[in-house]
Image (cartoon, rainbow, N blue to C red):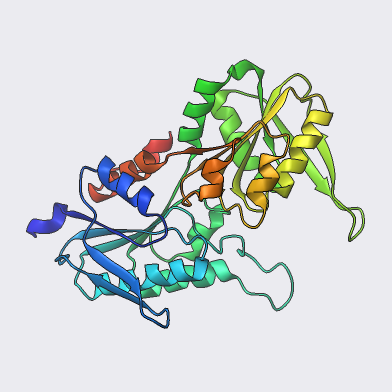
Amino acid sequence: MSKNGAIKLVAGNSNPALAQQIADYLKTGLTKAVVKRFADLEIFVEIQENVRGSDVFVLQSTSFPANDHLMELLIIIDALRRSSARRITAVVPYFGYARQDRKPGPRTPISAKLVANLITRAGADRVMTLDLHAGQIQGFFDIPTDNLYASPVMVRDIKEKFKVDSVMVVSPDVGGVVRARGLAKRINAPLAIIDKRRERAGESEVMNVIGEVAGHTCILVDDIVDSGGTLVNAADALLAQGAKAVYAYISHGVLSGGAVARVAKSRLKELVITDSIEPTKEVRAAGNIRVLPIASLIGEAIGRTAHEESVSSLFD
C-alpha cells in the first residue's frame, strides 16, 4: 500500500502544453509514455514507468481531430488498467460529442452516452471534465464524474478588467441562461438574454434582446464557441440596442472553419477562451482573442481528488 499517495500524470497528444502546466502546478513530472502512430495511423501506447498501485490521471481533451484524441484516451486507459494502476481518472477538459446529448430527430444517436460508455468500458474509475455542454451528461456515466467550472477563473479576470457596476451578463441563447445567471450572480451584475428565431427555414435568424442593455458593457457567456456566427450576430444585436461594448467569455474555443477570421473582423471587443483546447497559431495571432489559463484550476481539482478532499468547495 506504500504507493497509495503517488500521483501519476499521463498525457495524450491533444494538449501537451496544458498537461505540462498541470504537472508544474502539482510540482510533479509527466509520466514517461509513448503515444504514437503506426504507418497506417493505428495508435500505439506504451507506459514507460511502473504505475502499479498508483493513482493515475490521464490528461486528454477530445478536441479536433476528435476521434483520434478519443481513441488515444481509450487506449491509454486500457494500457494503464493492464499495468495494474490502482485508480484511473480520465481528465477531459473539453468533452467532445457533448452536443449530441439527446435525440434531435428520429433515428439519430445519442453520441455523448456512447462516448461515456466507451470511457467506462475502457477501464476509467472516474472522470473529471470542465463545463460540460449539458450538466445531465454526468448521469451518462456510471462512475463518479466531476464537472468543474471555469467561472471562478473568469470572474477573477472580469473583476480585474472591468468596472463591475457597468457590466451586464448576456446569455446568447435561451438554453444557456442557467450558466449566464450563475456568472452574473457571482459578480452581482444584471442579466439579459438573446432570443434567436427563424421565422421561416432558410431565412437568417432574428435576434431579440430581452433586457435593457443600453449604456452597459455586455459580456456574452457560453460554454462553446464553434463557428462564431452566433456570437458575432449577438454582438451586432446588442450594439444596435445601445450597448457600450461587447465582450465574450467562453469556456471552450472549438473555433472550427473560418471562425477565427470571423471573430477577428467582428465588432466583438474581445473573445476570452480557456486553454481547455490547445489554441492554434491563428488563435494566438488574432488581435481580439485572449486565452485564460486553467491549469491551476484542474491541477487543484486533481490534487484534491488524490487526497480524497472536496472538489465542489472550489466553487463555493
Residue 271, percent from left and from top? 60, 37
Residue 69 placement, left or right of 166: left
Q: In this figure, what is the number of numbered marks?
A: 0
- Outermost residue to the bottom: 40
Compared with residue 104, is residue 203 higher up or lower down, i.e. above or below?
A: above
Extreme-right residue of the structure: 200
Res 90 → quadrant: bottom left
Q: Quadrant of the C terminus?
A: top left
The image shows residue 83 at horizontal and vertical percentages of 20, 73
- Residue 110: percent from the left, percent from the top? 60, 70
Regarding residue 310, the answer to whether it shows in the image is: no
Judged left or right of residue 84, residue 78 is right
Vertical side of 158 occupied by 49: above or below: below
Q: Quadrant of residue 33?
A: bottom left
Q: In this image, 50 relative to 236: left or right? A: left
Instruction: Identify which residue, 67 or 91, lies in the foreground.
Output: 67
256 vs 206: above or below: below
Residue drawn at (39%, 70%) of the image: 72
Q: Residue at x 74, y 76 (%)?
A: 106
Closest to the observer, 220 or 314? 220
Quadrant of the drawing holding the N terminus: bottom left
77 horizontally vs 236: left or right: left
Closer-to-camera residue (168/268):
268
Q: Nearer the viewer, residue 146 or 75?
A: 75
Q: Is residue 239 visible?
A: yes
Relative to residue 84, is residue 297 depicted above or below?
A: above
Q: Residue at x 54, y 26 (%)?
A: 158
